[in-house]
Amino acid sequence: MKNEELFLKKLIQNDKAAVKEIFQANVPLLLKYGHRFTNDVSLVDECLVAVFIDLWKNRATLAQNKSIKIYLLETLRHKIEEKLSQLQLKRA
């Protein structure tokens, strides 16, 4: 069983330690990916925290065939784009 499959199985079984494992395994990639959209370190950090909160909240509904890594990347991109849009609206 691949790590992602194991992580997903643990998540669905409400294993909080799985979130920590997923975080440790993916945070370098996620930080690098987040900085492709903005150089604002605190914005990326804030969005990254929100991604992992969402991961825990949505653990029961995560599709068995969806890659956790893809879920994390897509969610992070969405959160950063959303936050940047909010900031632009405040400036306007």
Image: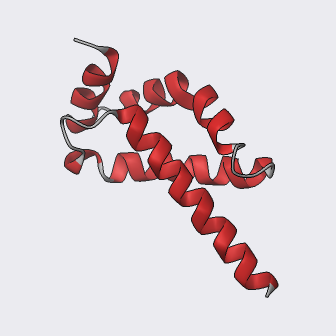
Q: Residue 76 appears at what percent x and percent y?
A: 53, 49
Q: Residue 7 appears at what percent x and percent y?
A: 31, 25
Horizontal side of residue 91 vs 78, given as left or right: right
Horizontal side of residue 87 vs 48, given as left or right: right
Return the residue nearer the eye: 37 or 59. 37
Determine the residue positioned at 60% across, 62% down: 81
Looking at the image, is 6 positioned above or below residue 70? above
Count up the numbered dots. 0
Return the residue nearer the eye: 39 or 51. 39
Residue with the most extreme top position: 1
Looking at the image, is 81 positioned above or below residue 28? below
Determine the residue positioned at 28% across, 35% down: 11
Q: Residue 42 appears at what percent x and percent y?
A: 76, 51
Determine the residue positioned at 78% across, 47% down: 41
Image quarter hosting the C terminus: bottom right
Image quarter hosting the N terminus: top left
Return the residue nearer the eye: 9 or 2. 2
Horizontal side of residue 28 vs 55, given as left or right: right
Specify the quadrant of the image occupied by residue 10: top left
Determine the residue positioned at 34% across, 53% down: 57
Q: Residue 37 appears at what percent x and percent y?
A: 69, 51
What scheme was used to colour the molecule? secondary structure
Residue with the most extreme bottom position: 92
